[in-house]
């Protein structure tokens, strides 16, 4: 059911954004006639299904986001950043209605200058927005073992709409081609409507790289979600298991996860999880 676009929550307006054209444009779009669906984005759904390290979720250019609500409902703290205080107000109201307001921080900011803290987030999401200068900082904000999910228009959009700014478009191969070493691209897909979607995992950088450790595996209990995920071993509560040549089997609720973390000299650790059905084929 669509939620009415009434804003009871007052979002603190960043002084430098008071007359900013992006704020004015998006506030007008999210005005009285707008109805928010609060449907989570598919890339957020996919990312939240995967093993994750502890930490909050960051959504850039969030709008009135269903993805932020989905992450909060899973027990994650969320930071939602947008230039539109009206959009953030809609999100805040819905979070209140669902009892999730304590998990979602609303950040009114100009993404052309605002930058996230590095290595802080288990997931960084951005959908429907592209800024090539922002992307490296967004990727660097993902913690080891965490996910980066992005969707934006490709340059094909300009052929459909010649007035569409090229600076808002992905070039061929982007954004995956812009990732530094140490990333595993899980998928990059071109979609109808001149859009491209990326889902990538940042590999864990662990002590002992290149020291012949063989296979390194670990698990960390995540109280926020009540499941197991990957994290750097220095994280408090980490349980490390080292072995030479054999993967480590772990039981996580009703399935076995085979987590093989292979030490690579250049690229760090690549992680893969195999569910119980696939495990039977491999053993």
Image (cartoon, grey):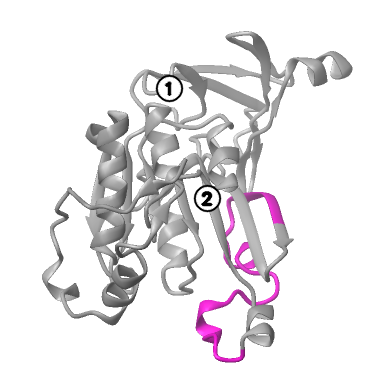
Q: Is residue 109 left or right of residue 143?
A: left
- Real-space Cα distance between discs 2 and 1? 19 Å
| Disc 2 element | strand
Image spot of residue 147 (x, y percent): 53, 44
The answer to if 164 sits in the magenta stretch is yes
- Does residue 62 appear to the left or right of 273 in the view shown? left
Query: Residue tagged by mark 2?
Result: 148
State whether residue 114 is above or below residue 252.
below
Q: Nearer the viewer, residue 162 or 208?
A: 162
> Does the image show residue 201?
no
In the image, 161 versus 31, the foreground residue is 31
User: Left or right: where does residue 130 sit relative to residue 171?
Assistant: left
Which label's residue is closer to the chain start, 2 or 1? 2
The residue that appears at 44% across and 44% down in the rendered structure is: 66
- Residue 254: x percent and y percent? 64, 8
Task: Identify the residue at horizontal 60%, vertical 74% (top origin).
Answer: 170
> Depth-wise, is mark 2 or mark 1 nearer the camera?
1
Asked whether 244 or 240 is in front, the reply is 240
10 Å neighbourhood of mark 2: few (<14), some, or many (≥20)?
Answer: many
Whole-percent x, y for residue 219 in the image: 51, 19
CB under 8 Å between discs 2 and 1: no
Q: Residue at x 33, y 76 (%)?
A: 25
Task: Answer left or right for 94 relative to 182.
Answer: left
Q: Which residues are magenta?
A: 162-188
Q: Residue furthest bottom?
A: 162
Task: Name the residue tied to disc 1.
Answer: 225
State the residue at coordinates (31%, 58%): 87
Residue 227 position (above or below residue 152): above
- Residue 89 vertical position relative to residue 241 in the rendered view, above or below: below
């Amino acid at each position: 059911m669509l939620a009415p676009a009434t804003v009871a929550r007052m979002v603190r307006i960043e002084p430098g954004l008071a007359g900013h054209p992006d704020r004015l444009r998006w506030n007008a779009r999210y005005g009285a006639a707008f109805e928010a669906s609060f449907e989570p984005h598919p890339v957020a759904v996919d990312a939240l299904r995967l093993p994750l390290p502890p930490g909050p979720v960051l959504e850039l250019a969030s709008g009135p986001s269903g993805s932020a609500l989905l992450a909060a409902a899973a027990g994650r703290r969320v930071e939602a950043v947008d230039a539109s205080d009206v959009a953030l107000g809609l999100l805040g109201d819905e979070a209140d209605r669902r009892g999730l307001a304590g998990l979602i921080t609303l950040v009114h900011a100009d993404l052309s200058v605002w930058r996230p803290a590095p290595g802080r987030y288990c997931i960084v999401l951005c959908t429907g927005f592209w800024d090539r200068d922002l992307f490296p900082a967004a990727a660097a904000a993902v913690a080891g073992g965490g996910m980066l999910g992005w969707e934006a228009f490709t340059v094909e959009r300009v052929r459909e709409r010649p007035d569409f700014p090229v600076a808002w478009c992905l070039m061929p191969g982007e954004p995956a081609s812009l990732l530094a070493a140490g990333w595993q691209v899980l998928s990059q897909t071109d979609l109808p409507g001149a859009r491209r979607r990326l889902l990538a995992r940042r590999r864990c950088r662990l002590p002992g790289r290149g020291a012949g450790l063989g296979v390194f595996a670990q698990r960390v209990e995540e109280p926020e979600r009540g499941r197991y995920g990957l994290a750097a071993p220095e994280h408090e509560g980490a349980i490390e298991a080292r072995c030479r040549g054999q993967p480590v089997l772990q039981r996580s609720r009703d399935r076995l996860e085979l987590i093989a973390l292979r030490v690579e000299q250049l690229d760090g650790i690549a992680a893969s999880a195999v569910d119980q059905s696939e495990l039977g084929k491999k053993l």
